[in-house]
Image (cartoon, rainbow, N blue to C red):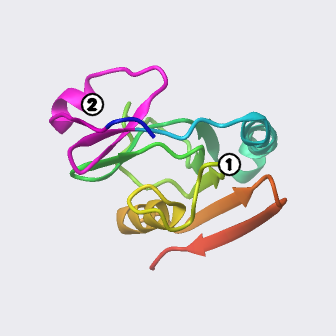
C-alpha cells in the first residue's frame, strides 16, 4: 500500500485516478492491484455474469465506485444490480458485490481487509457479498442484514 493522501470527499469524487483509488474516512487509498490469478478470475466471473444478464434481469460492472457511507467510497471488483439509470458514483446498494482476493489481501487488516469491506457493504444495504480466493479456488458468501 502507498502513502495515504488527505483530501475532502468532494474533491475525490471529481478526480480520476489511474488506477482508481478508494476514499476511506478522509484518506485516498491505493487498491491492491491484481496479479494474473486475480485479473483472470475477475474476467471469468464478469463474463459469466454478462452471459446471464438478460436471464437474471441484472447488469454487471467491474471497478465501479460505490459511496458506501458519507466518508467512504469503495470499489468492489464486480457488482450486479438491477437494470436502470445509474449515477456515476453508485449510492444505492447493488444486489451483489464480489471481491476477488489478491495475494496481498487479508480478511482482517482493517480498514483494508475484506472483513471491513463487507461491513461497509452491509451498512450500505448490500444483501449478498461473495469473496473469491483464486489461489485456493474457494469462496465465501456473506449475507447482509435484512
Q: Is residue 84 left or right of residue 67?
A: right
Image spot of residue 46 (x, y percent): 73, 40
Image spot of residue 109 (x, y percent): 47, 62
Residue 31 in the magenta stretch? The answer is: no
Q: Is residue 47 left or right of residue 73?
A: right
Q: Nearer the viewer, mark 2 or mark 1?
A: 1
Q: Which mark is residue 13?
A: 2
Q: Which mark is residue 42?
A: none
Q: Outermost residue, bottom direction?
A: 146
Q: Quadrant of the N terminus?
A: top left
Image spot of residue 32 (x, y percent): 54, 41
Among the 4 quarters of the image, the one containing residue 35? top right
| Magenta residues (range) | 4-29
Q: Pick whichever, 43 or 108, lies toward us.
A: 108
* Crowd rating for badge 1 (residues with CA inside 10 Å; few <14, some 14–19, many 20+): some
Q: Which residue is mark 1?
A: 103
Q: Pick whichever, 82 or 110, lies toward us.
A: 110
For image coordinates 45% across by 28% down, the residue present is: 20
For image coordinates 40% across by 22% down, the residue present is: 17
Secondary-structure class at tag 2: helix
**Vertical order, 18 against 81 (above or below):** above
**Vertical order, 57 against 143 (above or below):** above
For image coordinates 72% across by 58% down, the residue present is: 132
Q: Quadrant of the C terminus?
A: bottom left
Are the two marked residues, 2 and 1, in contact with CB atoms closer than 8 angstroms? no
For image coordinates 20% across by 45% down, the residue present is: 26
* Of pointers 2 and 1, the one earlier in the residue sequence: 2
**Vertical order, 103 against 85 (above or below):** below
Amino acid at each position: 500500500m502507498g502513502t495515504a493522501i488527505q483530501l475532502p470527499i468532494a474533491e475525490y469524487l471529481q478526480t480520476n485516478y489511474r488506477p482508481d483509488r478508494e476514499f476511506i474516512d478522509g484518506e485516498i487509498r491505493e487498491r491492491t492491484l491484481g496479479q494474473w490469478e486475480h485479473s483472470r478470475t475477475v474476467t471469468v466471473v464478469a463474463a459469466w455474469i454478462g452471459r446471464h444478464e438478460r436471464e437474471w434481469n441484472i447488469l454487471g460492472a467491474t471497478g465501479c465506485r460505490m459511496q458506501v457511507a458519507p466518508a467512504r467510497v469503495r470499489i468492489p471488483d464486480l457488482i450486479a444490480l438491477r437494470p436502470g439509470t445509474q449515477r456515476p458514483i453508485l449510492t444505492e446498494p447493488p444486489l451483489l458485490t464480489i471481491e476477488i482476493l489478491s495475494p496481498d489481501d487479508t480478511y482482517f487488516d482493517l480498514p483494508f481487509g475484506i472483513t471491513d469491506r463487507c461491513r461497509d457493504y452491509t451498512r450500505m444495504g448490500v444483501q449478498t457479498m461473495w469473496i473469491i480466493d483464486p489461489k485456493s479456488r474457494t469462496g465465501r458468501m456473506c449475507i447482509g442484514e435484512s
